[in-house]
Image: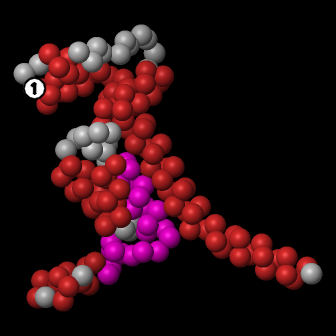
Amino acid sequence: MALLNGPLGTKIRPWIDQHDVLNFGRHALAKGVAFGLLCGLLPLGPIQMAATVLMCVKWRGNALIGIITTLYSNALTIIPLYMLAFQMGRWVIPGDYPVPNMSALTQSQGWISGTWDWLTAMGWPLFVGLPLLGVALAALGYLLVQSIWLLPVCLRARRMQKRSTN
């Protein structure tokens, strides 16, 4: 936050305050997590983060939490996430779409080109399943943050109600 005290910070600070991109309130945090989960399925990390920041600015989410949340999709998790998205796409699209053979990952020139060949073999089910998975993860993330935030409030209200009845 020391960056906001410099000359550039004095120009940016009113804009940041106006758009609530660093607000740590319940709704801003929930939106930041949701946008991070939604954009985390986009290819390439910089695109994920830029899209998350843009969504957080547009709809007043916490951009910092959104950027951190996009890190759930990384080199270890992207293949299982894309397989889940492929499966979701198979459930939605009529027809038979076999799972591509994973040997394409090792038969190509390198793992990057092998992964690309494997992903393109997934076709329409992946193309349809990625937005479905992103929206599902975003909704679950939003509801989870709201629930975790409101849990102490509900417990306190219950304790106060018990005290008033005694």
In the picture shown, does residue 119 fall above or below 22? above
Where 121 sits versus 162, above or below?
above
The overriding secondary structure of the stretch rendered in magenta is helix
Picture layout, residue 3 above or below residue 150: below
So how many labels did they put on this image? 1
Is 16 left or right of 163, judged from the image as shown? left
- In the depicted view, which residue is nearer to us: 86 or 95? 86
Kindly identify the residue that appears in the image at 11 percent across and 88 percent down: 7
Direction right: furthest residue: 166
Q: Where is residue 162 in the image (x, y as percent from the top left)?
A: 85, 76
Name the foreground residue: 72 vs 5.
72
Residue 111 visible in image: yes
Highlighted magenta segment, given as a residue range = 17-39
Compared across the picture, whether 114 is left or right of 33 comes to: left
- The type of residue carrying mark 1 is Gly
Residue 129 visible to the viewer: no
Q: Residue at x 71, y 76 (%)?
A: 156
Give the image quarter of residue 151. Answer: bottom right
Describe the element under mark 1 as helix, strand or loop: loop
In the image, is residue 65 above or below residue 113?
below
Which quarter of the figure is the N terminus placed in?
A: bottom left
Q: Does the magenta stretch include residue 124?
A: no
Kindly identify which residue carries mark 1. 110
**Residue drawn at the location 24% of the way across and 40% of the way down:** 75
